């Protein structure tokens, strides 16, 4: 990123009465257990009837107005790029953002343990992942492909009158191979004061085995008895772990904030000591991730000034410097409404939510309200600061003109690139999860699209999200990023505790290409089962509420513009190359026992009876509504599309996609011009049409039998019937039974056999599709026909490889065909 034309120097602040002071004293953190605690790994988190009264939401004091600055952000609005999966990096540019892993953690929501205020956090070393949120914790030993769960309510002993609730945070200390898991505990009864924040430590192997060492940060040890600790965070420096927390009085008023420095050597030895820094004037400190031997943290002085602290590991107290930033607006309510008219940012405020050091540059992120920098929606503002002299380099705005952005989390990797994880919602979008890379070639990708927003809080009517997300570098290489986020999907159960958390691994294509296949670390516990199907490899776009259901008549659709067609082809990864094969259990191809019976293999998807059918033809790509319509392409373009993850190997079954569509290709209505060179009537009732393109390449189009027996409640029944009629009228009516012989229970032209057939076709047979309910039998046949040019419109579908005539290398089909026009 380019520097501002003029650097904005910081101003050292002199200490005054009432300003932040460091205690300077070293304290020892108490250990609630003498030995490591063994925790259970569960296939699903147990349901927990949480207390109806948990600690109330504490409102931070409004940041005072700062003076107008001469500088503002010139950042352009976010451009959302289509997600590029790890399987599609063969032809990806080196600076493309690639998704290596995109896993839903479905179980917490099913157990009503994934709140609309989910606050997810994560840490990763190798294949081991620790993931936390409100109110659950998960562990993965296979790189986040699958998770088992730990019950944070009961796994560790409760202190007197305290119980777990609710904030958690996770990080990893590479220097001593130790995961850190912070859990916040609150009073079960009595005044809201004197709670603790518990630190649980475990080596990587111990995370898998479920063994954790515990140490507590108490208000007494910090020297602030009677205060309530809230909104914690973890950051790792060269030789220290840093814990930040806000402080509140028992009646909920802000009492400042604390930064606690804990030497890594003491964590490793078990003699855990700490040095707290207490501020009574500021709040919501965030220590920059990857700070090295000097920790940097900040808080707002006013709406155009950050107070940045530098705390060298050899110094007893941090040094503050005031840094001017572009003036921003707060206090108007962070208003943002989702497509159903509900608000989702009523809980948002301006506290720092992201902080990292990349080389010599600091990045601090927070949410600002609409109107800041004349932006129409709330957005994430980031200050980029030179750590060597604490001068402002750039004001960055992460904004979209139609939707709000909020809860930006930051971290940096070994290449000093800055990763971001944030939420996007309001206007045309329900809250959706985005990851990106801010430095170098800017890339942002929507990795999870929400179907709905939060229900109003019954106690105050507010629509709430937050309070933070997380992004971390993945050890040991620190090239890729791990991010957390969440959405609310499906109809919901009305609890506001049924969110869908998500674990995402992303990075530059050049770094993702070095990722090795997942190797599960052995552990003495049952293997984690695969996720419950169907789970798509990436989020399919939601059906816009205004569309009101699936498309029922292809004849009413326009043809999208070439520009829109190009965007859809890019989203379908045209030119990305084939995905590598994925191992999956083999299954026998079903053999019909009688003629003309509906198929079984992904049959609902093939005929439009699947749950995703309402997405077909809508062209909602990564949350961007491009308008319903037909995408014109060539046969060669379709046969060059990569098969998505989950159906990547055409020789294997795809059990997760039996009733689900795979990627953009299978939710797009395509139109191609090609030459029909062969026609078959197959035992599943389909007309199997072999198409040939201008280059000689071939693919298949299929028209099901247009009856309820074969296509059920498909909304495309009329279109399928019209297409079948066109083929009957143009091609099938020319076929004479006298020209056919029976071979292997199928009628073939006499020229297809060299012997005198024992059985000739009944001359009374009709090859036409019989009317529904007539009881007539349409014989099976296969025939080469006079090349006939046609324009074919149909839905994209990746079939299994069965060795059928005309199959494309990627076994793509138009299935079902919705329209046939003769050229």
Image (cartoon, helix red, strand yellow):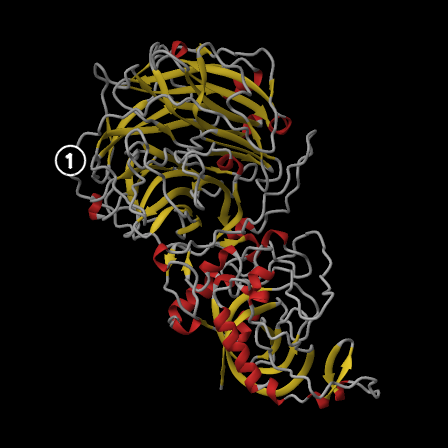
Observer-nearest of 240 and 145: 145
On the image, the x and y values in percent for residue 485 come to 44, 40
Note whether 438 is above or below 222 in the view shown.
below
**Residue depicted at x 59% and y 37%:** 126
Left or right: residue 398 compared with residue 708: left
Note whether 176 is above or below 146 in the view shown.
above
On the image, the x and y values in percent for residue 610 come to 53, 57
Q: Quadrant of residue 747?
A: bottom right
Question: Is residue 573 visible to the viewer in this orientation of the structure?
Answer: no
Q: Quadrant of residue 798?
A: bottom right
**Residue depicted at x 69% and y 80%:** 782
Query: Badge 1 is on which residue?
Result: 67
Left or right: residue 374 compared with residue 744: left
On the image, the x and y values in percent for residue 535 come to 55, 48
Note whether 262 is above or below 679 in the view shown.
above
Question: Is residue 355 visible to the viewer in this orientation of the structure?
Answer: yes
Observer-nearest of 400 and 749: 749
Left or right: residue 231 compared with residue 516: left
On the image, the x and y values in percent for residue 579 come to 60, 58
């Amino acid at each position: 990123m380019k520097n501002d034309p003029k650097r904005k120097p910081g101003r050292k602040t002199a200490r005054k009465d009432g300003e932040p002071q460091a205690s300077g004293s070293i304290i020892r953190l108490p250990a609630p257990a003498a030995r490591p605690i063994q925790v259970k790994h569960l296939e699903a988190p147990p349901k927990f009837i949480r207390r109806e009264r948990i600690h109330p939401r504490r409102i931070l004091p409004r940041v005072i107005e700062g003076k107008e600055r001469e500088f503002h952000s010139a950042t352009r609005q976010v451009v959302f790029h289509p997600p590029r999966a790890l399987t599609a990096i063969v032809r990806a540019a080196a600076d493309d953002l690639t998704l290596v892993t995109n896993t839903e953690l479905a179980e917490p929501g099913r157990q009503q343990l994934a709140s609309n205020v989910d606050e997810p956090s994560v840490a990763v070393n190798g294949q081991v992942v620790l993931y936390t949120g409100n109110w659950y914790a998960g562990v993965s030993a296979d790189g986040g492909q699958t998770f088992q769960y730990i019950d944070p309510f009961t796994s560790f002993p409760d202190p007197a009158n305290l119980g777990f609730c609710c904030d958690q945070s996770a990080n990893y200390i590479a220097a001593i191979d130790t995961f850190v898991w912070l859990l916040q505990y609150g009073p079960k009864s009595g005044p809201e004061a004197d709670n603790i924040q518990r630190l649980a430590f475990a080596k990587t192997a111990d995370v898998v085995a479920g063994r954790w060492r515990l140490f507590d940060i108490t208000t007494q040890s910090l020297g602030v008895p009677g205060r309530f600790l809230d909104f914690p965070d973890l950051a790792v420096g060269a030789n220290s772990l840093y814990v930040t927390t806000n402080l509140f009085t028992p009646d909920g008023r802000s009492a400042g904030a604390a930064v606690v420095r804990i030497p890594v050597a003491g964590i490793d030895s078990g003699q855990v000591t700490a040095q707290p820094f207490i501020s009574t004037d500021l709040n919501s400190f965030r220590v920059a991730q990857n700070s090295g031997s000097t920790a940097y943290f900040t808080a707002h002085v006013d709406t155009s000034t950050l107070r940045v602290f530098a705390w060298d590991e050899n110094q007893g107290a941090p040094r503050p410097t005031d840094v001017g930033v572009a003036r921003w607006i707060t206090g108007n309510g962070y208003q943002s409404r989702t497509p159903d008219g509900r608000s989702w940012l009523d809980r948002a405020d301006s506290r720092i939510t992201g902080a990292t050091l990349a080389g010599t540059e600091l990045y601090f992120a927070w949410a600002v309200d609409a109107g800041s920098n004349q932006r129409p929606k709330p957005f994430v503002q980031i200050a980029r600061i030179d750590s060597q002299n604490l001068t402002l380099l750039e004001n960055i705005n992460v904004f979209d003109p139609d939707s709000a952005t909020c809860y930006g989390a930051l971290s940096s990797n070994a290449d000093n690139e800055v990763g971001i994880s944030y939420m996007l919602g309001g206007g045309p979008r329900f809250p959706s999860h985005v990851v990106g890379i801010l430095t170098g070639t800017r890339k942002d990708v929507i990795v999870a699209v929400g179907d709905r927003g939060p229900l109003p809080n019954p106690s105050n009517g507010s629509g709430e999200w937050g309070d933070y997300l997380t992004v971390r570098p993945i050890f040991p290489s620190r090239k890729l990023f791990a991010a957390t986020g969440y959405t609310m999907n499906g109809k919901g159960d009305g609890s506001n505790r049924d969110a869908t958390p998500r674990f995402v691994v992303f990075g530059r294509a050049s770094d993702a290409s070095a990722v090795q296949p997942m190797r599960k670390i052995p552990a003495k516990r049952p293997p984690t089962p695969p996720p419950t199907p169907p789970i798509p490899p990436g989020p399919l776009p939601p059906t816009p509420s205004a569309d009101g259901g699936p498309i029922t008549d292809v004849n009413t659709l326009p043809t999208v513009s070439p520009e829109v067609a190009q965007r859809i082809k890019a989203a379908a990864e045209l030119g990305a190359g084939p995905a590598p094969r994925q191992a999956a259990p083999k299954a026998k191809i079903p053999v019909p026992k009688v003629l003309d019976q509906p198929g079984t293999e992904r049959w609902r998807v093939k005929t439009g009876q699947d749950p995703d059918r309402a997405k077909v033809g809508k062209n909602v790509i990564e949350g961007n509504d491009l308008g319903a319509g037909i995408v014109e392409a060539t046969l060669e373009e379709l046969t060059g599309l990569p098969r998505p993850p989950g159906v990547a190997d055409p020789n294997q079954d795809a059990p997760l996609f039996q009733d689900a569509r795979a990627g953009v290709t299978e939710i797009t209505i395509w139109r191609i011009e090609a030459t029909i060179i062969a026609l078959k009537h197959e035992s599943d009732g389909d007309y199997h049409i072999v198409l040939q393109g201008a280059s000689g390449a071939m693919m298949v189009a299929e028209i099901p039998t247009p009856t309820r027996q074969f296509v059920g409640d498909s909304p495309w029944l009329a279109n399928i019937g019209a297409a079948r009629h066109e083929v009957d009228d143009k091609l099938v009516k020319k076929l004479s039974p006298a020209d056919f012989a029976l071979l292997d229970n199928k009628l073939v032209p006499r020229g297809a056999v060299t012997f005198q057939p024992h059985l000739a076709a009944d001359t009374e047979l009709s090859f036409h599709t019989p009317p529904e309910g007539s009881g007539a039998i349409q014989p099976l046949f296969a025939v080469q026909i006079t090349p006939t040019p046609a324009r074919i419109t149909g839905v994209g579908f990746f079939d299994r490889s069965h060795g059928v005539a005309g199959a494309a290398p990627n076994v793509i089909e138009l299935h079902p065909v919705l329209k046939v026009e003769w050229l």
